[in-house]
């Protein structure tokens, strides 16, 4: 477990293999919600929270339940159930404790269950930090940290996109490209720009 | 019977899940690097769509309203696991190529979307044809996108060289190129739609 | 010009003729660098520049026709995009490469956003990164300048092979570039892209623009200064031992800072915003040059800051009209 690894995870998750612009996870929510900054930010925080927590929980499940009992083929089912349950729990808790917070982003929470990013990162963590059926040293910390970084990368992409799209509201975009097509083209250019960080070595 | 055929064909063009409904874009962009990957993913997704649409339509009257989404997810996840295991056994190369996007079929908006929008409200036969149509439409969209990307990005189609001396445009094999292709295709289809109107 | 109700940050007056005049003056001020590039790299550079400009104009013209809008090729922006893109290319690229770049620049970098004044990103740079990603080998193969400036002031270039590295590429590989002096770099006696090597020609053009008031010093100076400081601190074998002068004179920094990071449309409107923009570009360029895989990061840095510009504008806009 060393600093180098953490830095690499950070640069990879936020820039080089940005969850949206490079891995395409969470694309549906990205295209749909990145039109305005406030909802984009709310969604981003919710996503970051859910991804981090579910990364941790699924790590435990894999390490202490699926692996020892040879049930790794149940990974997909168990992970998605865990995520769905967790999101449901969080929604109930927020609704009870803070109606304001619930109004702010409670509506996005059910959407996150099917946000590819959550399940995708959970699976990715396993692929990256478990080698030959054994957990890599420090894999729990790497897993949680990657969850946080993916959230940061998601937030960055959402923020940049919402800023750009809000400005384009006032522009004379050719009709066939309005809304979605242009959003994809912008994402394409952003993806190209982020490639500048390829081969990053600290 | 005619009605059933209609349920099938609508998934191909009029309500194509990728280009018209804009669903399931995450795996579409990720796996469309080569046509063989696209076809593989299309078949896997169609299998899951078919199976889950039929089963969900079958049991729709027995599921309590409040827990219907988790129930759908369990059904879908089961089919995905079956598909995953079959792929690992019979074509491990495809499994490696598709990577995390196979288990991600569980949260593919197309699958859950059709369950929510159609299978839980219609009978088994209609759901079967709807699932099949959506799956085939998805596969066709995948073939189109990956065909463009593979040809421009590597100069080959399905592994065979098409034009000699073609300088491959590497960006199309990259995420940026994928986003570009779908942006331009969506723009193109919008343009066609606009002309028809 | 059709009048549209635009709710936006000041300035609100868009003067078509003024925009056009500025574009052509920028193009004019870039001519010294182009002449130097052709002198240093040979006639092929001239053809690359010409093909680039012609295809840029043609693309814009065809787009105007197809979308049934006013023909805009005389406003100078397509000309400028073609020129700037060519300046960002090595002289020995195959002749089909510039057209691919200009078509991408004009259509994807500018027209799909709605044309001039509405692009988020600098079109020439969009084209450049597209070309870098698509044909990396062609974009990073530099031949040694056939003509070196043997005025007795500089030593002749000593290159290993026909395809030779630029100073930054050599730095990235840890190779020693002792045969180059700062004067060599200043005059352009090195491998590189057509329009980026001759610093003195670029500074001449920049001076013209600054004097005429078409660009302001805020972005270029903060950009170059930040890059210098960053490389001084981090680019050496230990901290505070970096060769900042080498970094400032190498790569596309001078070209980018004065002519592309100052793009009116894609950069912040307020002075404060411009300084943030300059610092951001400088930091990103430094980070990529020192720790990234690519030897040069100017294009990527500017594009990333272009993306952040809507935000910078929003949070730095003046609260009272008329003050800044």
Image (cartoon, helix red, strand yellow):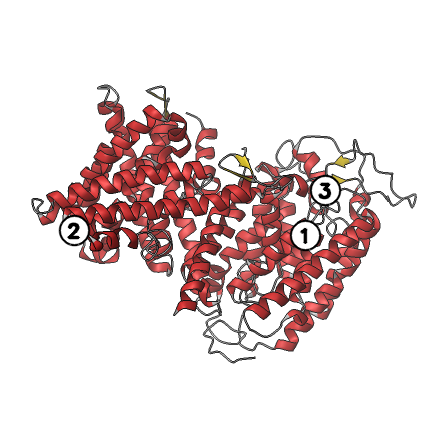
Q: Closer to the camera, C61 or C237?
A: C61
* Chain of the residue on which disc 3 is drawn: C
Q: Badge 3 local density, few (<14 within 10 Å), some, or many (20+)?
A: some
Q: Closer to the camera, B127 or B100?
A: B127
Please report contact status of discs 2 and 3: CB closer than 8 Å, yes or no: no
Residue C19: assigned label: none
> Can residue A127 be seen from the camera position used here?
yes
Q: In this view, does A70 lie to the left or right of A165?
A: left
Q: Closer to the camera, B105 or A164?
A: B105
Asked if badges 1 and 2 are on one and the same chain, I answer no
Q: State which quadrant residue C35 falls in.
A: bottom right
How many angstroms separate mark 1 from mark 3 (CA)? 29 Å
Q: Position of residue B196 (x, y in %)?
A: 40, 68
> Can residue A25 be seen from the camera position used here?
no
Please identify the residue farthest to the right as the structure is shown.
C152
Please report contact status of discs 1 and 2: CB closer than 8 Å, yes or no: no
Q: What element carries label 2?
A: helix
* Chain of the residue on which disc 2 is drawn: A
Q: Is residue B120 left or right of residue C157?
A: left
Sequence-earlier tag: 1 or 3: 1
Residue C246: assigned label: 3
Q: What element carries label 3?
A: helix
Please report contact status of discs 1 and 3: CB closer than 8 Å, yes or no: no
Asked if badges 2 and 3 are on one and the same chain, I answer no
Q: State which quadrant residue C54 falls in.
A: bottom right
Q: Quadrant of the C terminus of chain B?
A: bottom left
Q: In this view, does C44 lie to the left or right of C152?
A: left
**Residue tagged 1:** C98
**Residue tagged 2:** A97
């Amino acid at each position: 477990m060393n600093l180098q690894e953490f830095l690499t995870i950070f640069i990879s998750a936020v820039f080089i293999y940005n969850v949206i612009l490079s891995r395409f996870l969470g694309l549906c929510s990205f295209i749909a919600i990145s039109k305005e900054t406030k909802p984009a930010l709310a969604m981003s925080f919710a996503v970051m929270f859910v991804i981090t927590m579910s990364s941790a929980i699924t790590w435990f499940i894999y390490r202490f339940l699926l692996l020892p009992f040879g049930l790794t083929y149940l990974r997909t089912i168990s992970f998605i159930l865990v995520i769905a349950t967790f999101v449901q729990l969080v929604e109930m808790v927020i609704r009870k404790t803070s109606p304001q917070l619930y109004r702010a982003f409670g509506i996005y929470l059910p959407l996150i269950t099917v946000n590819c990013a959550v399940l995708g990162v959970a699976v990715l963590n396993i692929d990256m930090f478990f080698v030959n059926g054994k957990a890599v040293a420090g894999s729990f910390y790497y897993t949680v940290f990657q969850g946080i970084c993916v959230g940061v990368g998601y937030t960055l992409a959402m923020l940049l996109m919402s800023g750009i799209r809000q400005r384009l509201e006032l522009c004379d975009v050719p009709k066939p490209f309005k809304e979605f097509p242009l959003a994809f083209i912008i994402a394409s250019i952003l993806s190209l720009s982020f490639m500048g960080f390829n081969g990053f070595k600290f | 019977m005619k009605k059933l055929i209609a349920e099938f064909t609508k998934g191909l063009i009029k309500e194509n899940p990728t280009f018209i409904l804009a669903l399931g874009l995450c795996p579409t962009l990720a796996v469309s690097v080569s046509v063989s990957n696209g076809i593989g993913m299309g078949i896997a997704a169609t299998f899951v769509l078919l199976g889950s649409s039929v089963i969900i339509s079958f049991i729709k009257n027995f599921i309590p309203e409040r827990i219907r989404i988790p129930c759908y997810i369990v059904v879908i996840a089961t089919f995905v696991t079956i598909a995953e295991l079959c792929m690992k056994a019979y074509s491990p190369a495809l499994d490696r190529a598709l990577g995390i996007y196979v288990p991600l079929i569980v949260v593919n908006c197309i699958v859950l979307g059709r369950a929510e929008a159609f299978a839980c409200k219609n009978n088994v036969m209609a759901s079967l044809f709807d699932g099949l149509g959506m799956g085939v439409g998805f596969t066709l969209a995948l073939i189109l996108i990956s065909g463009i990307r593979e040809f421009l990005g590597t100069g080959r189609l399905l592994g065979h060289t098409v034009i000699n001396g073609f300088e491959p445009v590497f960006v199309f094999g990259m995420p940026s190129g994928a986003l570009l292709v779908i942006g331009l295709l969506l723009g193109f289809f919008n343009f066609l739609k606009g002309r028809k109107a | 010009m059709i009048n549209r109700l635009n709710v936006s940050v000041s300035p609100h007056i868009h003067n078509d003729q003024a925009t056009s005049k500025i574009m052509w003056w920028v193009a004019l001020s870039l001519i010294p660098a182009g002449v130097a590039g052709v002198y240093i790299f040979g006639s092929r550079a001239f053809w690359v520049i010409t093909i680039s400009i012609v295809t840029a104009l043609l693309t814009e013209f065809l787009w105007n026709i197809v979308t049934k809008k006013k023909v805009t090729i005389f406003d100078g922006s397509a000309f400028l995009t073609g020129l700037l893109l060519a300046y960002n290319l090595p002289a020995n690229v195959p002749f089909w490469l510039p057209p691919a770049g200009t078509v991408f620049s004009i259509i994807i970098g500018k027209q799909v956003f709605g044309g001039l004044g509405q692009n988020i990103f600098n079109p020439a740079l969009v084209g450049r990164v597209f070309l870098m990603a698509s044909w990396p080998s062609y974009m990073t193969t530099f031949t040694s300048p056939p003509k070196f400036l043997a005025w007795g002031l500089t030593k002749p270039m000593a290159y290993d092979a026909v395809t030779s590295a630029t100073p930054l590429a050599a730095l990235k590989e840890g190779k020693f570039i002792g045969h180059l002096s700062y004067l060599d770099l200043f005059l352009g006696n090195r491998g590189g892209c057509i329009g980026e090597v001759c610093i003195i020609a670029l500074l001449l053009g920049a001076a013209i623009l600054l004097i005429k008031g078409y660009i302001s010093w805020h972005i270029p100076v903060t950009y170059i200064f930040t890059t210098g400081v960053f490389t001084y601190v981090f680019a050496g074998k230990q901290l505070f031992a970096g060769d900042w002068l080498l970094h400032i004179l190498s790569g596309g920094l001078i070209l980018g800072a004065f002519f592309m990071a100052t793009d009116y449309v894609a950069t912040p409107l307020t002075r404060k915003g411009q300084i943030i923009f300059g610092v951001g570009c400088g930091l990103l360029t430094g980070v990529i040059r020192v720790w990234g895989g690519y030897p040069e990061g100017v294009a990527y840095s500017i594009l990333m800051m272009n993306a952040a510009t809507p935000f910078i504008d929003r949070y730095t806009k003046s609260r009272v009209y008329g003050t800044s």
